[in-house]
Amino acid sequence: MSQYTNPDKIRPSCACKHHQYLYNNWPLRDVWIDVSDCMKQCMYCGSDLKLPNKLREHLTRSHKDRNLVIRKRKPGPSCERDPRYGKLQTEPHGDGTDRSNLAACDNIETILQSIQESFSICFKGPQRTSLCSLAGIPPSVRSRWQSSTVSIPVLLPSSKCWIDHAPSLDELMEDTIQIISNSTETRRGSESTFKTNFQGEADDSITPSSVISQLVKPRCDKAAAFLTGLRLPTVKKRGFRCPDDLCMIVEPMEESNEQVNLTPRYSFVDLHIDYGADGVSSPIEDCVKVWFMYPPTEKNLAAMKGLEGQRGKLARLQHDLEAGIVVRTTSEHALYIPAGCIHATFTLQGGFLVANDFTTSQSIKALSAYITSGLDGTLSSTAREDCFFLFKRCLDVCLTHKQLIPAIKACLSAGPQLAMWADSNPDWRTDMQRLWEQNKLCLDQITTGDDLFTCPCNQQSADMVFSDHFASSHLPFLVSTPEQRARKRRRCGPQ
């Protein structure tokens, strides 16, 4: 049988060498397709249509039985357009969330091949076979995520993130150009303003205009630059929020730090942790991202600690990290990244990414593990302050929602680190003391089964209530000592 008469054979639709891997796993049916300008031959029957518009018409008219949706490509700044597709299907999920049409080319081999083609990072050996997609998470991987953080990562429909509707590429570009033109060197030094990044590190020597130029002409020589921390008025106006579907898994609280990243094709952000905060991220229009995500298990955090301050973490740690999940996201997706998640990001198609941070009543466990690992020591002084402020905020949310045992275990685990921070940050210490004092009565009413809760340290005496034991044995650093009060008087001078 000729290859052009075999209905089950996929033919390359273009001659581009860097696109050939896409056709290795191209679905036979039930798929949406973005026809790029280089595609001229039908991948199903082999017909040569000469023009991409003719191919779109042919697929629509001649292959109705395959249940194809041929999407119209939107104009954008990049002259390079990759073929794109995604399965049309509804997969059952135990959390009750309907994620129809969200499995966008999540075949692991296809994704890894695209990373190797575009970024020259090769995954070999056991690590290649141990990585999984969101659609096929083994019980052992799920268990490691659920025991170390809030949940596994979750893919949600991006349309439900916007109070109005998603902004257009043109609107975001206009905002970005305006902000860049108004920026000064002084403002750019602030944590609250955008940063230019080169090879994954903040670099003020890179001009923001050169990042915009890379949207038009991407650099594939490991010299891609990108912008992070943009605060764009259009995003604020349209209202980017955590989608209601996320409440089926966890309740997001205190949403904050809404920001936008401008990432040309070939941008890469190496393995990192966002201070232990939860987050939702969504690409805009043609932007396509691949995420490598790992849970904050003790093994994974130790591996990250071993390479603190060094580059090439993903390439060097790929054989040491456990329970990895890989997912490809487009503008149809909003990705929930749970607290403490170790992740790296590859940009396959340039554009904007909108992100929002928040916390939950369950996030304190991952943040405690992050602080206990010592990884906070690599942060800048301002970022470290943000990290311990986030711990205090997580504790407040935890206690407010009567998640007392997780709060207790988090403070027990990170006790030495919290004590050192409290010693030099009296205002933080006072706020922490107030939170525990407000919940003193509740602490003595915690039960496990039919019995009152006793401290996991196994040192609580029978004649002492838990709150007194906890305060005296595990939170003494929250009580201001005479020496600390004397230091405060010396700092403040005579009253």
Image (cartoon, rainbow, N blue to C red):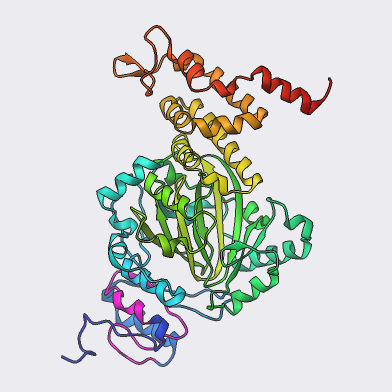
User: Is residue 40 rendered magenta in the image?
Assistant: yes
The relative height of residue 445 versus residue 250 in the rendered view (above or below) is above
Q: Residue furthest top?
A: 463
Q: In the image, what residue occupies the spot 70% across and 68% down?
A: 205
Residue 76 point in image, percent of width and height: 57, 74
Residue 223, quarter of the rendered image: bottom right
Q: In the image, what residue occupies the spot 34% across and 71% down?
A: 110
| Prevailing SS of the magenta stretch | loop
In the rendered image, is residue 96 in sight? no
Residue 59 point in image, percent of width and height: 35, 81
Residue 3 point in image, percent of width and height: 22, 89
Q: Could you tell whether 413 is left or right of 220 in the image? A: left
Q: Could you tell whether 202 is left or right of 357 in the image? A: right
Q: Residue furthest front?
A: 483
Q: Quadrant of the C terminus?
A: top right
Q: Quadrant of the N terminus?
A: bottom left
Residue 140 point in image, percent of width and height: 26, 48
Q: In the image, what residue occupies the spot 31% across and 47% down?
A: 142
Q: In the image, what residue occupies the spot 40% across and 59% down?
A: 317
Decide which of 315, 148 is in the foreground and name it.
Answer: 315
In the rendered image, is residue 71 in sight? yes
User: Is residue 195 rendered magenta in the image?
Assistant: no
The relative height of residue 54 versus residue 235 in the rendered view (above or below) is below
The relative height of residue 361 versus residue 46 in the rendered view (above or below) is above
Over which residues does the magenta segment extend?
A: 20-49
